Image (cartoon, rainbow, N blue to C red):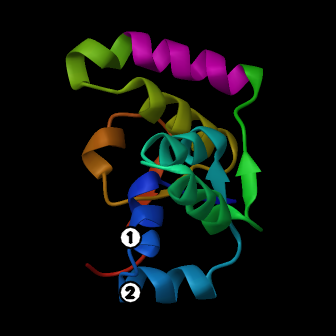
Amino acid sequence: MELIDTDVLIDVQRGFGAAADWFATDPDVGVPGFMVMELVQDARNSDEVQKALALVDGLEVVWPSEAECQTALEEFSTLHLSHGLGLLDALIAATAVGHGGVLNTFNERHYRMFPGLTTVRPYGR
């Protein structure tokens, strides 16, 4: 299963044509649960919360297993200071690796150091 990163869903949410076209034609993607929480966190009011939740409605929300959380902790501990790996990025990357290793994102620099993770740019910008 391929997973979607926050930046891709923000493009969809903002109505970017290439993102909306890709999103409409690639239904076999999931969203990390922590990514959904990021979308909600960025909402400024209850209407935006509902729009964020509606955006992912119908997609599989994927949560990391205990083993994936352990991997995230190990990689975060190793890579946070040396490579700037963020906490949520570590959790999202570990979840993607545990579910097939593919993350649709334009934030390759956030993830390039994470072992076993493949990032894909799903459409042209």
The segment highlighted magenta reads 67-77
Identify the residue at image location x=73%, y=51%: 61
Identify the residue at image location x=33%, y=34%: 113
Question: Which residue is label 1 attached to?
Answer: 11
Tell me if mark 2 has few (under 14), some (14-19) or many (20+) residues whose alpha carbon lies within 10 angstroms of its own: some
Figure quadrant of residue 81: top left
| Residue 69 is covered by the magenta coloring | yes
Q: Position of residue 107 (x, y in %)?
A: 31, 52
Identify the residue at image location x=63%, y=54%: 31
Identify the residue at image location x=31%, y=40%: 110
| Residue 78 is covered by the magenta coloring | no
For residue 69, above or below residue 124 = above
Q: Between marks 2 and 1, how big is the CA–CA gap?
A: 9 Å
Question: Which residue is label 2 attached to?
Answer: 18
Tell me if mark 1 has few (under 14), some (14-19) or many (20+) residues whose alpha carbon lies within 10 angstroms of its own: some
Figure quadrant of residue 60: bottom right
Which amino acid, by three-letter code, is at mark 2?
Ala
Of callouts 2 and 1, the N-terminal one: 1
Which amino acid, by three-letter code, is at mark 1?
Asp
For residue 85, above or below residue 23 = above
- Element class at badge 2: helix
For residue 47, above or below residue 35 = below
- Tell whether 28 sits left or right of 113: right
Q: Position of residue 39 (x, y in %)?
A: 50, 49
Compare residues 31 and 104 and report the one nearer the observer: 31
Quarter in which the C terminus is drawn:
bottom left
Q: Are marks 2 and 1 in contact (CB under 8 Å)?
A: yes
